[in-house]
Image: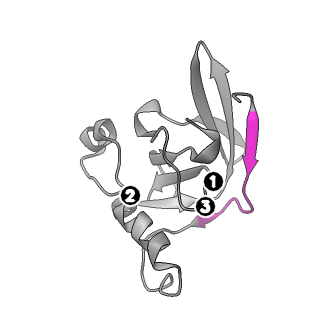
Amino acid sequence: MRTLLAALLLFSVPAFARDAGQWEHENPAVRAWYENAELTVPAQKRFGFKSCCAHSDVVRTQFRVSHDDGADQWWWLDRGAWKQVPADIIHWGEAAPDNQPTLFLLGGEGEPTCFYPGESGN
């Protein structure tokens, strides 16, 4: 059902996806998912790289989705302000291993590069 929802995650600080050894005890399938996650084709053209984890980090934040004019629009909370997730980075119909909305930001604080809406987004 498409309604306004808030998917609250526990922290508002970056949770780094790059593997510098801190993820060695994580489930290998989960590690592989993050290692293989790629930008959408339009985002690859805009940013000039392919891997979500190459230059970006996963951030823990709050999300909401609205259904306007026949299309879902996703929003993320950035330091107290809601910002719209760019449409060209959304992986519709795909989810991160925990099925939660997952956002990658350039350098962990910059521009959004990859977004997986999770089970709540189509």
Residue 6, percent across and down?
75, 41
Q: Residue at 48% across / 34% down in the picture? A: 86
Residue 53, percent across and down?
39, 62
Disc ID at residue 100? 1
Quadrant of the frame with the C terminus? top right
Quadrant of the frame with the N terminus? top right
Q: Residue at 40% across / 33% down in the picture? A: 88
Residue hosting label 3 = 98
Q: Quadrant of residue 91?
A: top left
Q: Quadrant of residue 4?
A: top right
Disc ID at residue 88? none
Of pointers 2 and 1, the one earlier in the residue sequence? 2
CA–CA distance between discs 3 and 2? 14 Å
Whether tag 1 and tag 3 are in contact, CB under 8 A, the answer is: yes
Residue 96, percent across and down?
53, 56
Q: Is residue 30 above or below residue 72?
A: below
Q: Residues within 10 Å of mark 3 (few under 14, many from 20)?
A: few
Local SS, label 3:
loop
- Please, what is the three-letter code of the amino acid marked with disc 2? Ala
Residue hosting label 2 = 37
Q: Quadrant of residue 55?
A: bottom left
Residue range in magenta is 5-14
Q: Is residue 50 above or below residue 11?
A: above
Of pointers 3 and 2, the one earlier in the residue sequence? 2
Q: Nearer the viewer, residue 27 or 60?
A: 27
CA–CA distance between discs 1 and 3? 5 Å
Q: Residue at 35% across / 48% down in the picture? A: 39
Is 82 within the magenta? no
Q: Nearer the viewer, residue 49 or 35?
A: 35
Between circles 3 and 2, the one closer to the viewer is 3
Q: Residues within 10 Å of mark 2 (few under 14, many from 20)?
A: some
